[in-house]
Amino acid sequence: MALLLPIGLGVVYNVVMPDVQKPVVTVAIASADATQLPAALSAIAGSTVDLRFNNVASAAEVTAQVEAKKADVGLVLPAGFDAAVAAGSAPTLSVVQPPGSSTLGAIYIGSALDGALRSMAGQHAPAVITTQTAQPAHDAASVMTNLGARKYMVLGTLIMLIAMIAIYVLPIILTEEFEKKTADALLMVGTQSDLVAAKVAVGLTYLAVSVPLLLVVAKMAPANLPLFAGALVLLAVTMIGFGLLLGALVRSVSQLNTWSSIPLLLVLMPVFFVALDLPSWVQTVLGATPGSQAMRLLVDGLTGQAMYGGWTLGFGVIAAWAIAVYAVLIRTLSRREA
Amino acid sequence: MVEMAALAELIKSPTVIRAQPSTPMIAARDLTKHYGAVKAVDGISFEVARGEIFSLLGHNGAGKTTTIRMLTCRIKPSSGTAEVAGFNCATQTDQIKPRINLVSQDQNLYERMSGRDNLAFFASLYGAPASRVAELMGIVAMTEVAGRRVKTYSGGMKQRLLIARALVNKPEVLFLDEPTAGLDPASAKEVRSLIKDLSRAGTTVFLTTHYMEEADELSDRVAFLAHGKIVALDTPQELKLRYGHRTANVLLEDRSKTTIALGSVDDATRMASWMCDGKVLTVHSQEGTLEDVFIALAGRAL
């Protein structure tokens, strides 16, 4: 259940939440000869608009596609169009617009045509236009705009998956070992540290299977894989430490079932608060939690951009929690043994 | 039940360098463990020789389990030393753990796994060959049920499996904590037989039990623990002679029964009189029991 719930949520987000996408403009084009016009228009559009061209045989088919809304706009080029443009003889280019109010696609093509035709005619533009992408702001709204709600929620679900395995599944396994005294048999072979290491390995094995599965189901591929994977592994090790500490503190599985939801909530809440526009002091407090820092690192790792930045601080905060929680865990187990 | 030759072979095949025969397999010297003001174990000293069955008897809370936990390197003594196979329990746990094993009273097996898988898991932890699993299943006469889940086993079968698990690493010293607790008489007899076979095969056995008859039957020597201190330590025979009441049950011709103390002059005179008068039908001598010894030493029965 701990595995199925987060993966199921990932599937749901995948279905109900669309990604943030660049606008798509479909152009039906009829040209008797080969033409450079689509390439010229695409060069102007760059990465801001996804231009798609449907090459058809006649002006009638262009009109039919626009009427059927299979294309946002249509272009009909006469024979010898490119040569005529290059010669400066001003050939006629027919633009077929959809009925009623013009679409954004039609408006975009209308405004882009002049520049495209000038470049085909070998004319210099009156000014050189350079485009720069502004660095994303660190505010929550911009993160959500750039990343999209779906990817953000899937990342949150990914951390939820780690938390469910670390703070729900593993403590049950550890507590059962103590409750049924099988830990006594294991400790005849190894040490408390060996026992902890074995449980961490169990948790990481669960996650090595389930995390890639969730990412595949959600169709998400991290742009900065080392950053993404590093944050995930460090967070997983830390949360497993929390879970094992919980397992070492309680006396029975029934106690664990009663209390495990509280640490689960405490760990998960900061994760989802990262995208909220909260006062700076709240953000500072959240920044001290491993879940919040992991979410920031995962966002940056997924997008390949330093949307939050501060990676060293992020890894440092999570690592500090890991060291502290494992120290307390070993101490707790030793005291329990004595 | 047990194939002795197979068992002896199993125990003798060394996985570790065994201790020299002259070295006591267990040596406790002024061993003490206290929790705050409470002294769970209070300066006990004893030695156990190779192949010996040594029993530690005492009430609940007398310090038996704490002693076992110190000897099995689970907890460190507050003072004094404990050595197993010549190694210090507090500082040389890595050398001791491969040489020892424990059968606890808790039947701490993985119930959802089969008996075979339980043994295979621990064999893998000890780095023992997979062939050891079938061998051990045969020794405890459980080959037929090896593939069944442990939760379907009877108490006796579980206890035999626990003993098989404890033999996975061919221990030189086997600690048995109440190995027959909760077993029916037939199962308890099987377990006792297995313990005797282990001892004959050269394994040193350290036993705690509540059952005085069991300690009497199995042990080469017995130590009585009370309030963390050893109050007596000797062979069962010597202890019974020293502390037990030697008596005889006499059935007289009028069918009345009476018990006379063998060391009493008055009772001897009475017995002589009955004999002269031909009143005695039967006489059954009765030596003291370890239970008597324990009551004499600890003030109450186990």
Image (tube, coloured by chain):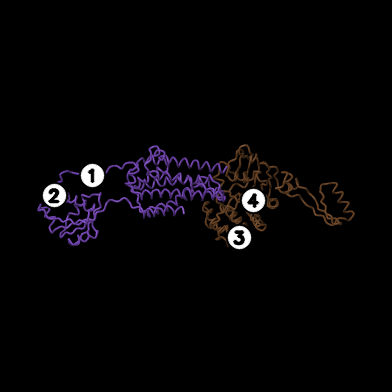
Chain colours: A purple, B brown
Type of residue at label 1?
Answer: Thr
Q: CA distance from mark 4 to mark 3?
A: 21 Å
Q: Position of residue A227 (x, y in %)?
A: 36, 45
Pointer 3 local density, CA inside 10 Å: few below 14, some 14–19, many at least 20: some
Query: In the image, is B262 to the left or to the right of A31?
Result: right
- Residue at x-position 50% and y-position 48%: A171
Residue that lies at the very extreme toward the front in this rendered image: A100
Single out the mark in the foreground, 2 or 3: 2
Q: Secondary structure at mark 3?
A: loop
Q: Secondary structure at mark 2?
A: loop
Type of residue at label 4?
Answer: Glu
Q: Secondary structure at mark 1?
A: loop
Q: CA distance from mark 1 to mark 3?
A: 82 Å
Type of residue at label 2?
Answer: Gly
The residue that mark 3 highlights is B141
Given residues A144 and B193, the one toward you in this image is A144
The residue that mark 4 highlights is B178
